[in-house]
Image: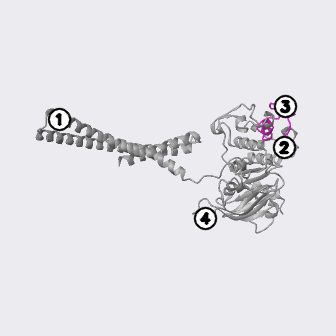
Amino acid sequence: MPLKIVIKSSFSTRAILSKVSQGIDSSWCASRFLVKFFDLCFVLVFRTKAMDHHYWLTNFWLMWRYDCLGSVVVFLTTCFALLSGVGEGFAAISVVQAEIFAQATRSLVSVFAQLELDFNAVERITEYLKIPQEAPAVNEAFRPPAYWPSDSSGLFVENLVVKYADHLSPALKSISFEIKPREKVGIIGRTGSGKSTLAMSLLRILEATEGRIILDGIDISSIGLQDLRTRITIVSQDVTLFEGTVRENLDPLQSHSDEECWQVLRSCGLASSAAMFGDDAGSLSGCPSTNKLRPDQHQPAASTVFLKSLDMKISEGGKSFSVGQRQMLALARAMLRRSKVIIMDEATSSIDLQSDAQIQSTIRECMGDSMVITIAHRLFTVVDYDKLIILKEGRIAEIGAPKELIQQPESLFRKMCLASADWASLQHQLGSS
């Protein structure tokens, strides 16, 4: 009984520390969340103190019982020594050993309880050992060439079936499609339709149960995870920034020059065109300099230009930057890698429309040589893409160009546009009659 109380108390303490950590790392300072946060902390503290109180009550109860048992043992040993007529020396040794036995028994129970509690760590290790392991990082028997993926072939998905667990129903149900090189493809659908599952399948975070994914003529299941994931860039909704400098976050492996770093930062509107290397800095893979844009091209807003040095410090998690600035920095990191395949997993879902438009403009201007797969919840984000894939309940409901889909009266994409508050703008942008 006391051991169970100790375990529950430790779990409750972890819950308090977890909530406090969440409060420090997130925006709990908002007044409407502050009361809820304090109430939750008070409930957890009360629960922890209740467990702790019962633990000590049970501990004192048990120690008192063992003290009573030790006294009874010493008393019986003394009576036995007196009645048996042994010598004074043997009687004294018997009484002392009886008292030591009572103390040792009490200590043995405490040590056993602590040992059983410590074996929780062994239990966790055993659970981790049973977790299915990922595929090897490198498959020495088959490694892709250095230029893979190239522009010679695109992405082919054939009868792909993906499950999160063997006992669950498939999240993706035998889907097939093709994406050509340099195409910009948007994947849309309601929550739970399988959009993020598809992105994780492309990176083999979730292995395919059936079917295959062929990228530039190579089945991705036949190569190592490191060879696959280093050739594909993903920009997720929750951007990961590490504590350090801008350069360390932008180019962790230090494989690019400062000029290339400044070029992508200027292209994303995070630095001025005259920063560090002046206006005559070279362009990076067809990405135009911000001071040479045509009148119809995107010009970064002055409010977004804030980086003065690559040695500028970034706090843990990038909390010193706004959400839009973190997304633009992640996009600059993706541009610097020059990957032929870029996955945008709802990267603009938590930012404003202006920042979203800036990111899409940067993608069109600076990623023309890359295949871009964008998982979006805003129709405006992907309305000018080459192709749309609409998922519904793990299946492909529609696939085609936005201009073609919106002109079909029974099209699911058209119905989604009609239900949107921006229907007039969408219709005007697509040139639909």
In the rendered structure, does residue 277 fall within the stretch colored magenta? Answer: yes
Dot 3: element: loop
Say the numbered circle drawn on residue 167.
none
The quarter holding residue 402 reads bottom right
What is the number of the mark on residue 278?
3
Residue 336 at what x, y percent from top left?
Answer: 77, 41
Location of mark 2 (residue):
285
Which kind of residue does numbered mark 2 sit on?
Ser
- Residue 313 placement (x, y as % from top left): 68, 32
Nearer-N-terminus badge (3/2): 3
Q: What x and y, as percent, mark residue 113?
A: 37, 44
Q: Whole-Å distance between the Cαs marked 4 and 2?
A: 43 Å
Residue 90 circle label: 1
Mark toward the start of the polypeptide (4 vs 2) = 4
Q: 292 or 60: which is nearer to us?
A: 60
Secondary structure of residue under mark 2: loop
Cα separation between marks 3 and 1: 98 Å
Mark nearest the camera among 2 and 1 is 1
Q: Residue at x 26, y 37 (%)?
A: 100
Colour scheme shown:
one colour
User: Residue 41, can we see it?
Assistant: no
Instruction: Name the residue furthest bottom.
Output: 410
Task: Of the two numbered discs 2 and 1 on the same chain, state the one appearing first in sequence.
Answer: 1
Give the camera-side residue of 380 and 182.
182
